[in-house]
Amino acid sequence: MTSDLNPKWYNNSDQLRDYLVIYINGERHEIRGEQAFMTLSDYLRHEKQLTGTKVVCAEGDCGACTVLMAAVKPGSTTTEIQYQSINACIQFMHGLDCCHVITIEGLPEQSPDKQGNQLHPVQQAMVQAQATQCGFCTPGFVMAAAGMMEVKNKIKKQHARNFLTGNLCRCTGYQSIINAMLDIKHENHSSIKDCYHNPQLHQDLLTHSQTAVRIQHQNNSFDAPLDSISAAQALTSTEHKIFAASTDLGVQFNKGHWQKQRVVSLNLIEELHHCELKDDCARIGARVTLSQLEKALCDVHPEWVAFMHIFASPQIKNNGTLIGNIANGSPIGDNLPFLLAMDARLNIQGPTTGRTVNLNDFYQAYRQMDLAADELITHVEIPNKADDCFLKLYKVSQRRDLDISCVSSALMMRFDQHNQLQAVAIALGGVAATAVRLKTAEQSLLGQHMGDLLQPEHIKATAEMIANQVTPMSDVRGSEAYRKLLVANLYKKFMAELQASHEVKA
Amino acid sequence: MKFKDLPHDSAVSHVSGTSEFIDDRPKQAGELWVEVVYSTVAHGDITHIDTKAAIAIEGVKSIYSYLDLASNRWGSIVKDQPLLAEKTVHYIGEPILVIAAVDKPTALAAKAVVKIDITAKQPVLNLKQARAQRRFMGETYCIETGDSAAEFAQAEHLLTGQFINGGQEQFYLESQASIVYPEENNCLHVHVSAQHPTEVQHVVASALGLKQHQVVATVKRMGGGFGGKESQSAHYAALAALVAHKTKKPARLVLSKDDDMIVTGKRHPFCNDYQVAFDHQGKLQALNVDFYTDGGAYIDLTPAILQRAMFHVDNAYYLPHARITGTICQTHTHPHTAFRGFGGPQGAAVIEHIMEEIALHLDIDALDVRKINCYQGNEQQTHYGQTVDHNVLPELFEQIERTADYRARRKSIKQFNQQSTGLIKGLALSAVKFGISFTTRFLNQGNALVNVHVDGTVQVSTGATEMGQGVNSKIRKVVSEALGVAETDVRLMPTSTEKNANTSATAASSGSDINCAAAANACHKITARLANIASQLWAGFVPSDEHELCLLDGRATDHIEFKGGQVINLKQPSQTFKFNELVGIAYLNRISLSDYGHYKTPEIYYDKAKGKGRPFLYFTNGVAASEVSIDSYTGEVKILRTDLLMDLGRMINDGIDHGQVAGGFVQGAGWVTTENLYYSDQGKLLSHSPTTYKIPSIHDTPRIFNIDFIENHSNVMNIRGSKAVGEPPLLLGLSVWCAIKDALRNAGLSDTAGLCIPATSETILMNLSGQMPEQVL
């Protein structure tokens, strides 16, 4: 490490905060020292006795801890802030600097009903539809649904399912919950955004977002600089971790696999919150959440956006980032096959200089990548795909939604005017130590005629050839044999869909 | 959907987040956090324990072992299980030590540095190994009817096979949790998330050498139970109680979800051999089933669960000749325990599987096989000798065939499958006839305490515990009807052994039957006294300082009705009292406004040795038709449509029963599809959190989901003519599994006999590709 030679990032800062500013249910909190390193759910339950927020899995997979969060981003010019659901159990307090958190205790009260209960329309609907049984998951559902009401004013069955994907209930079988969502009374309801609208609060958070933060407590440290070079300079040891949203480190912390928090946050770096649609690519900053991407890219990459609908829960997508997914380097990394297939490029920032690498050259071995300890990924550039390319993304898991894949894949083919294969990508996750592109297989297909490729024997032989090029292992998500079979079958499925689409065109 | 009855009595506090669960209780001064150190080895001898480093950590108060317990054996049926392991460990997750520390991080830090040396011994990790080594617990049970051996000898058609079902994690959202408060004179108050406070009280007292009257166990509510808190909550409550008793400080033990899943038992896996004889129409002639279940390391509730599996092997179908045996295998895994259905689903799965196999064998529709075998006409006697009274099964089959449009859909599915390349559809119908009552007779009793206050409002305490199933709301309704007061004037109090002693677990679907009846009995004693004085007052008696109103023998009160907050003389409708007015008079005249009711279920018995009796008061019945699609490239399953039709008699609360049916069905569907318990070859559960263990999500419920009920007023044996609902609908999840089997056949598979439960995507795809690996349980 060269940290001694580099100026410490915070020496460059004129001012530093040693506290976080977080609003909870409209009330201002300055968080210092030990409390900055707590998870939000611990802080709410143990420090504030706000026990309506429950913890079950402590890994962001059940939604019992769902709260709403509105973030004021540095440099934002609008006073409109959006309240979105997140998992409180895997969110650290330091990840909520300059945010407003609404818990179930803070849901705006409505005018009293006949029994004198001042319930939010979601709560009212859930009571009437008998949508609570044991009640342990209920606050999480209420909050996720309240988040849905912030953006939807007529709720259909599919909205209910999509917005509540991240919440598990073991009692109801969900039917009454879905019915409750359809019965929500929207009349005379004022949104959380309106109820809590407060220009002073907004200004307070915005002002603080322009000041860097450094908090230390015992073995823990939290640095939130204002620019990427400072962030790289703050990475002064291999123990330091870049924090985009902590959806993975939060889990590691709760399960006792990661105790010493040496955190470098990207939260206050304005440019990393931006997603730019350029003529030839989309350039996505490290703090751009998956939810933002779903909205921003629905025209440019519709297949991928559709894939993201089943990729994770709203709570994770509202917080988790694409670059977090890339830097995590999971062998499965649901988004990675797509990015590999698209030849995405990473902008990497070091303490003095930056560089760009193709994602296909980035992964080296299991959780090893071409990234020095004092480097961070600031952006990913995803080239726009050609209009005539045929792209399919598949994810196979034990359960379709809210489940880590057994195998994920991105398959792409592009034919010239003579129906010769001009470009091809076969990218897979869950079949090797890293997500991979099968270049040899791709090479062997290039230049072939579509008619030949669609021959059943050809499909069968290619599927087998592809399956033989992967080296999956057996684990809790699936056996080696199953994964190989899936790899072969996903190619077959892709070819069947290619044929169908070709027939439609013809 | 609109319901006639009031919402759940905790609905408002649930949606507001103000319902209090164990870990929501504020931390008291001096309170200690309890962590348990578990075995990481499935089978072995403990050679050395070193706690020096752990105890040296600041804030660690003490570390306890089995030596600190007055009695180290517990068990609901047989006291065979140590609370803390002694010389030998028998499963991964078996508690060995208990750590008490000032807070959770400190306790976890201590746990991390405790050293336990275990010399590993060869474990037996699955049913196959246990059967091969004949590692059995207890006797082999047998139920026999007719002469099946003779029938097999002359059978028209004969099928033999093995049927395997996996376990299932209860996945209650609130993990095992208890807080124990020490009280004066060595007494303890245990607040616990448990279905059986009386057993908690007894196990705690026995473990610590206390008398039962020194321990009070209170259950306000559970964040789900599903059977997982029937017996095993007592184990962990006792470990918390050990800390409170020794340190005289409040002690809190809340398992993490991962620990909870690793250490506690599941629904029992089974591996059964069967032989079935039937005629050319598919009518059963004889059935032999030898059940083998994995009990895990200790007995727990396994004998009763196995027995229920044996009782439910007929499910909805008449068995003229049968020989059913049941044997418990002992393995080095967590002791398996109750889970909604309690062996019933495992029993019914065998015969539903056989129905499908017969249909395939004879190439006829499986619904016709089911209909011809359904209890009907003269064929109403079960293999254990109980007659199916007021049998509605034929009516249920007939109605659902129509309402689910079975025949037409069967045709359109056939057409769909002929044209489709990537998707295959399947359709199947299954039934349930679930016996209601504990099969152990003495458990079928309950008691209730009803306190009427002078303003006319009521507090009720019973032995029933509320785990979301709505038992409190049902008792509230029964009490409100018995006293003629508004439901909102009746409040159900936390269940506590100081008010209701010697209670049974809230289990066997019987919680509301038994406790509603007990509460009604208590109410009737109160209304008898109130009616007695009302009749005197209407007759002109004027109480005064000199003449106190007293209860008089022999007064006729049949004409006095309690309704709508009024006490009414039906003979003289102008004569009424407001309920609270009469209550006030009663109090001033020293007439008791409280009472205690006891109830025992009538007319039930079972002779285990003979395998005959009338173990159930009645049966709850239902049928389901499910349609699924399978992605033939990936094996992924979608439930496209499910129609459920239940017979619940006269429902006490329609919304609650509706929720029980939907929830039970989806739980059953989870068991047969995505819920896969995955163990390492060392016997460690690796699917121990929702990341890897997949209960159904909101996307996994049927796309079209119709729930309906038949009208049935004949169940006069039970309170208000109602029927128990808790467990039966879970068995209808089997319709999904049968539909998957049907889809596989539609995909051209000629042999689906090897399909197990759960039919995961992997299992399905491997079946489709003919690559099915040998199933090991």
Image (spheres, coloured by chain):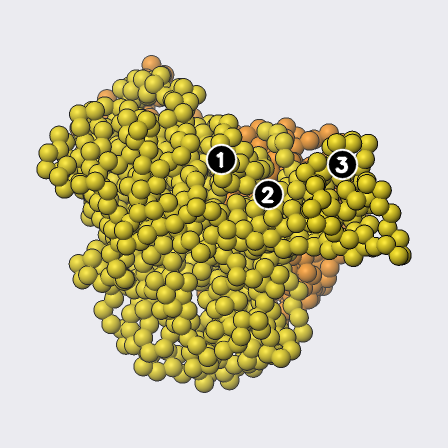
Residue at 18% x, 31% y: name it. Answer: B278
Observer-side mark, 3 or 2, equals 3
Same chain for mark 1 and mark 3? The answer is yes
Q: Nearer the viewer, mark 1 or mark 2?
A: 1
Left or right placement of residue B583 versus residue B419 in this view:
right
Q: Quadrant of residue B621?
A: top left
Q: Residue at x 28, y 41 (%)?
A: B383
* Secondary element at image label 2: helix
Q: Chain of mark 1?
A: B
**Residue B238 versus residue B559 in the image, above or below:** below
Q: Which chain is yellow?
A: B
Give whichever of discs 1 and 2 has the lower sequence position: 2
Q: Which amino acid, mark 2?
A: Lys
How many angstroms separate mark 3 from mark 2 (CA)?
25 Å
Residue B181 pos. (x, y %): 61, 71
Camera sees residue A76: no
Please give the name of the residue rendered at 56% of the width and 62% of the height, measured from the top-left corner: B501
Residue B638 image position (x, y, % from top left)? 39, 33
For the residues marked 1 and 2, what is the alpha-carbon distance in whole angstroms? Answer: 17 Å
Tag 1 near tag 3, CB within 8 Å: no
Percent x, y of residue B537? 82, 44
Q: Which residue is mark 2?
A: B474
Q: Which residue is mark 3?
A: B568
Between disc 1 and disc 3, whose residue precedes?
3
Within 10 angstroms of label 3, few (less than 14), some, or many (20 or more) residues?
Answer: many
Asked if disc 3 and disc 2 are in contact, CB closer than 8 Å, the reply is no
Out of A405 and B211, give the one closest to the viewer.
B211
Q: How far apart in space, not on screen, are marks 1 and 3 (Cα)?
A: 29 Å
